[in-house]
């Protein structure tokens, strides 16, 4: 299949970028990233600068790949990352627009690569539980209610890719933060530190300059792991409680 | 910063203020509509004018009305701050932006700020025209059997509603309010952390019914006056 790619090119340290058009020959069995590999091979062989894009596991669990394809984070397929998107979902002769995540808190490093260390800093201030090292505790020593465990597991599915921020008209990180807060707060091991955690993580989120949630729901609709905005409501509840009743 | 200002200036704190002030204004709309519906009573404005007198003199209502002015201002100021912050957070635009829930059919949620600004302009005109006249203007006095003289607000209202352009302006404003409410109603609950499998569908549906019925009720009055009075 013959494709025209309209790709955002931006040099490192340059605030300005622009779209460039490329023609590539792909087949429908390729993943989207393999198609970009083919393009980059062509570019390298003709002595041009290859398109920078992030990728790692290529099986939809690491959250590294990140690009907006035809206006949708991770492309047109529901509940998948770019690496799981295959070229059979496109037609011969298509023009595909590829852009990086666009958010002030995700500055562009080069081309399609953005700096998502703002997410790391949010995790660093509270996205963990404190445990003593030593022998592994017995698996069933702490009873966890089945429903709560499932909700926690659903939130833990967040791979931190940033598609929620990319999809949100306000570039808000509420879905990410709410998934991380919910995943820990719903389990007894995480519950003990939940006031401290939610306060620190929300404050860091604000400091990083993410936008405010206006309950549009684009994050939930575009999340490759289909994290629910019910988590955002839980984050709101937890933050209210921690702020009003926390010491 | 004290914990309190820290909380109120956090993103979630600001959303809480938007939510609580919004819910107050939602309830106010219902009360205001019930008052306005008295315009439809065919008594030459007696019930409406007596009601106007009650609303401007009752101490409890007066106290609540100061809260109302304050909440309108707070809702506006917070909304503008949020809108500016959100624009800053998305500092560069997508060439193609087609995220689901935004495209292909954008909901009111995307345009709460602009819709709010239009509503603010309507409120300012509306208050200057009726509220300010009632408070300070030289309205004629009327006396109904056995009562003291009251200000006749009914006559300027009936006059305004006889102008076709004013009716059009009013009805369009009500449509804008309907869109603003259609997102605002359910959004207020989500911001308070109320999202539950059992209740959220109810909140959503009640919100949609409310956002249609209340503005429709308001819009009905000038249309009725224009056509039948």
Image (cartoon, grey):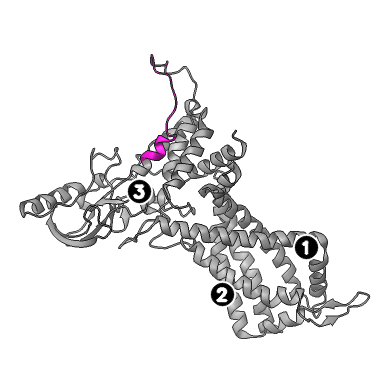
Q: Position of residue B178 (x, y in %)?
A: 57, 66
Instruction: Tell me what residue is drawn at x 67 percent, y 85 percent.
Output: B162
Asked if residue B119 lies in the magenta stretch, the reply is: no
**Of the residues tagged 3 and 2, which is closer to the observer?**
3
Q: Is residue B201 visible?
A: no
In the foreground, A71 or A43: A43
Callout 2 and callout 1 share a chain:
yes
Q: Which mark is residue B62?
A: 1
Question: From the viewer's perspective, is B198 left or right of A89?
Answer: right
Q: Is residue B19 visible?
A: yes
Instruction: Tell me what residue is drawn at x 6 percent, y 54 percent.
Output: A47
Tell me the distance, in whole angstroms, between the alpha carbons under discs 2 and 1: 29 Å
Segment tinted magenta in the rendering: A120-138
Farthest residue, direction front: B1
- Marks 2 and 1 close (CB-CB < 8 Å): no
Q: Which mark is residue B172?
A: 2
- A148 w.r.t. B85: above or below: above
Query: In the rendered view of the protein, which quadrant contains the C terminus of chain B?
Result: bottom right
Asked if residue A129 lies in the magenta stretch, the reply is: yes
Q: Which residue is mark 3?
A: A163
- Marks 3 and 2 close (CB-CB < 8 Å): no
Pointer 3 local density, CA inside 10 Å: few below 14, some 14–19, many at least 20? many
**Of the residues tagged 3 and 1, which is closer to the observer?**
1
Q: Position of residue A157 (x, y in %)?
A: 38, 37
Residue A68: name its quadrant.
bottom left
Tell me the distance, in whole angstroms, between the alpha carbons under discs 3 and 2: 37 Å
Question: From the viewer's perspective, is A105 left or right of B191?
Answer: left
* Disc with the residue nearer the chain's start (2 vs 1): 1
Q: Chain of mark 2?
A: B
Callout 3 and callout 2 share a chain:
no
């Amino acid at each position: 299949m013959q494709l025209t790619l309209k790709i955002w090119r931006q040099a490192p340290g340059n605030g300005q970028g622009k779209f460039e058009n490329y023609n590539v020959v792909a087949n429908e069995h390729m993943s989207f990233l393999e198609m970009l590999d083919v393009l980059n091979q062509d570019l390298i062989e003709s002595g041009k600068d290859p398109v920078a894009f992030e990728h790692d596991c290529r099986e939809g669990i690491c959250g590294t790949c990140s690009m907006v394809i035809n206006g949708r984070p991770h492309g047109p397929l529901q509940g998948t990352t770019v690496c799981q998107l295959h070229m059979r979902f496109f037609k011969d002769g298509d023009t595909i627009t590829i852009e990086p995540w666009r958010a002030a808190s995700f500055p562009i490093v080069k081309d399609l690569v953005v700096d998502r260390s703002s997410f790391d800093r949010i995790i660093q201030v509270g996205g963990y539980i404190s445990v003593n090292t030593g022998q592994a505790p017995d698996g069933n020593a702490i009873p966890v209610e089945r429903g709560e465990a499932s909700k926690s597991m659903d939130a833990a599915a967040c791979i931190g890719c940033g598609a929620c921020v990319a999809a949100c008209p306000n570039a808000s990180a509420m879905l990410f933060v709410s998934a991380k807060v919910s995943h820990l707060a719903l389990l007894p091991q995480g519950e003990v530190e939940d006031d401290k955690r939610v306060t620190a993580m929300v404050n860091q989120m604000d400091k990083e300059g993410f936008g405010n949630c206006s309950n549009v729901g684009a994050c939930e609709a575009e999340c490759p792991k289909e994290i629910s905005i019910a988590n955002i409501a839980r984050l709101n509840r937890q933050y209210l409680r921690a702020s009003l009743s926390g010491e | 910063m004290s914990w309190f200002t820290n909380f109120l200036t956090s993103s979630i704190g600001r959303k809480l203020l938007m939510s609580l002030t919004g819910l107050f204004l939602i309830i106010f709309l219902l009360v205001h509509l019930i008052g306005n519906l008295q315009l439809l009573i065919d008594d030459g404005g007696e019930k409406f004018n007596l009601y106007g007198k009650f609303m401007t003199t009752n101490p409890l209502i007066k106290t609540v009305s100061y809260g109302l002015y304050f909440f309108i201002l707070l809702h506006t100021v917070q909304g503008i701050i949020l809108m500016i912050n959100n624009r800053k957070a998305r500092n560069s635009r997508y060439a193609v932006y087609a995220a689901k829930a935004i495209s292909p059919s954008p909901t009111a949620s995307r345009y709460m700020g602009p819709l709010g600004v239009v509503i603010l302009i309507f409120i300012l005109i509306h208050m200057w025209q009726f509220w300010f006249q009632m408070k300070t203007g030289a309205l004629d006095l009327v006396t109904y059997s056995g009562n003291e003289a009251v200000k006749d607000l009914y006559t300027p209202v009936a006059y305004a509603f006889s102008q076709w352009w004013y009716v059009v302006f009013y009805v369009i404003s009500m449509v804008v309010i309907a869109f603003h409410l259609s997102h605002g109603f359910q959004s207020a609950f989500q911001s308070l952390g109320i999202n539950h499998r059992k209740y959220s569908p109810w909140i959503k549906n009640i919100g949609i019914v409310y956002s249609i019925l209340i503005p429709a009720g308001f819009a009905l009055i000038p249309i009725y006056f224009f056509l039948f009075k």
